[in-house]
Image (cartoon, rainbow, N blue to C red):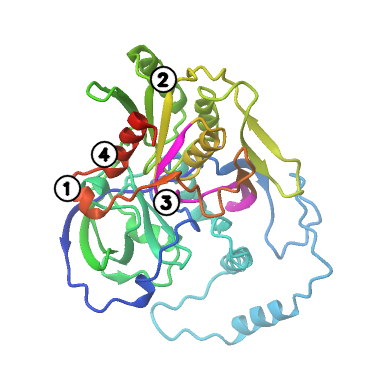
Amino acid sequence: MNNLDDDGIQGGEDVDAGTTHPRYTSKLYLGILFAIVLAIGFAGGLRVGAATTSDIISSIPLLGDGLSAKPDQNVNFTDFWKVYNVLNDRFVETHASTTIPDVKAKQWGAIQGLTSSYKDPYTVFFPPEEAKTFQDDIAGNFGGIDVEIGLSKESILTVIAPLKGTPGERAGMLAGDLILTIDGKSTEGIGTDEAVKRIRGPKGTTVTFTLYREGKNVGVSVVRDTIQVPTIDNSLDSKTGVYTIALYQFTANSANLFDKAIADFKNSGSKKLILDLRGNPGGYLDAAVAMAGHFLPKGAVVVTEDYKGKEDNKIHRSEGAGSIPEDVKMVVLINQGSASASEILAGALQDTKKATLIGNRSFGKGSVQELIDVNGGSLKITIARWLTPAGRSISDGGLTPDIKVDRTSEDFEAKRDPQMERAILFLASGK
C-alpha cells in the first residue's frame, strides 16, 4: 500500500489582484483530487498489483493474468470507428502544435478518454511515458517543490499542503491556496497531471506561481530541489506538561519512529498528549494501523475497505494492546492538509472516543486504488473506499473536528498557532 505528495518553493511577493473572478471567491471544497509532485507512496490509497491488461480494441479473449479482454458484444462501437476513420482520412495539420499520432498513441488516447468518463479523480490511465513518471513518483526518484496539489470540488488547482521543512513551507505557501498560474500560464481547466508536468523540472531551476489567498493574489518563485522531508518530531513542554508528537508523513519506518516517540511520552510522566497531523498527506496504511494499536485494544477495528459488494470487505484491526493508560487525555490536530492515512488514524481515534479532534475539516481522501499494468501503461483504478470504525466514509467530505479552530495566513505570518493553543487549553480544562 502507498500514498502521494509534492515539490518546494522560495520567495513571495504580492502582485496586483486585479478583478477577482467569481470562480475564485466561492466557497472552496477540498476533497476531490489528491495528486502530487513528489510522491511518498499511496497511503490508504494505492494497491500495486502485477496485473496486465490489453488495449480497448484488443480482440484477445483472455489474458494470462486472468483479466478479460473479450469485447463486450452489447456495446456498439460504430461511432468510435466512424470518428477514428474520419480522423485518419481527413485530418489536416494546420499549425506547429498539431500532431498526427501513431496507432499506439491513438489507442492510449482512447483508453484515457474511457477512463476519464468515470469522472473519478483517482481513476486515471497513464500511457507508458507517464506511467514511468508515476512509478518514479512512488519511489521518490526526483527533485521538486514538495507541495501537494489537488483539485477542489470546483476543479480549481489547489495547494493541499506544503510539507514540513520544505522550501514551500518556508516560502509561506498554505493549504487552501488556489494556483492561478504556473510560469505565467493560466491553470484554468487543466488537471493535476498537466500541472505536475509544468511544475517539475531539473534541480536548481525556478518555477513561478500566482496564488490566490484570502482575497488577493500572491506571487511566489520556487527553486526546485531534492527534498528530504522529516517524518516525526516529539517533545515535552515543561510549562504545560503537554507532550506533542508531530507526524509529517506515514513512511515505511514511521511506525518504528512512532513507537519510540510513544515510549518517550510514557517515560516523560505526562498525561496530556497532542498528536499533530496537520499538513500530513498520508503514506502507508500499515503504519497508520500499527500506530492505532497504541491506543486501541487488540482486535478493535481501525478501518474497513468497503468494496460495495464487488468483493468481501477487508477489515484492518488493531494488533496492539492499547498500551496508552486510560487516564491520558489526547487531542489530534487536523486541517485540510490532513489526508488519507492521517484521516484513517484520526477517524479511528475519534470514533472510539480515544481523542478529541481540533482544527479544520480534513481533506477527504478515502478511497483505495489498484495499479494495473497495461502493456507498459498503467491504469490506476478506484476499487474501494475507507470507512471509519463507526462506518463513516472518509471520502464524504473528510473528518469534522470536534472543536473547530481556524488558523489564518495572518496567524502563520505572525507565527501564531491558535489550533495548538486551543488543544493545550482543552487538555488543561477539559473543555
Q: Which quarter of the image is occupied by the C terminus?
A: top left
Residue on which disc 1 sits: 414
The amino acid marked with disc number 4 is Gly
Residue on which disc 3 sits: 36
Task: Give the spatial CA distance, label 2 vs label 3.
Answer: 30 Å
What kind of element bears circle 4?
loop
Instruction: State the residue at coordinates (40%, 18%).
Output: 260
Q: Residue furthest top?
A: 267
The amino acid marked with disc number 3 is Ile
Res 222 quadrant in image: bottom left
- Tell me, yes or no, if residue 171 can be seen here: no
Task: Give the spatial CA distance, label 3 vs label 1.
Answer: 28 Å
Q: Which residues are magenta?
A: 355-383
Residue on which disc 2 sits: 262
Mark 3 vs 1, N-terminal side = 3
Camera-side mark, 2 or 4: 2
What kind of element bears circle 2?
helix
Which x, y percent locates residue 339?
46, 45
Camera-side mark, 3 or 1: 1
Task: Give the spatial CA distance, label 2 vs label 4.
Answer: 23 Å
Residue on which disc 4 sits: 165
Which x, y percent locates residue 241?
29, 22
- Residue 378 part of the magenta segment: yes
The amino acid marked with disc number 1 is Ala
The amino acid marked with disc number 2 is Ile
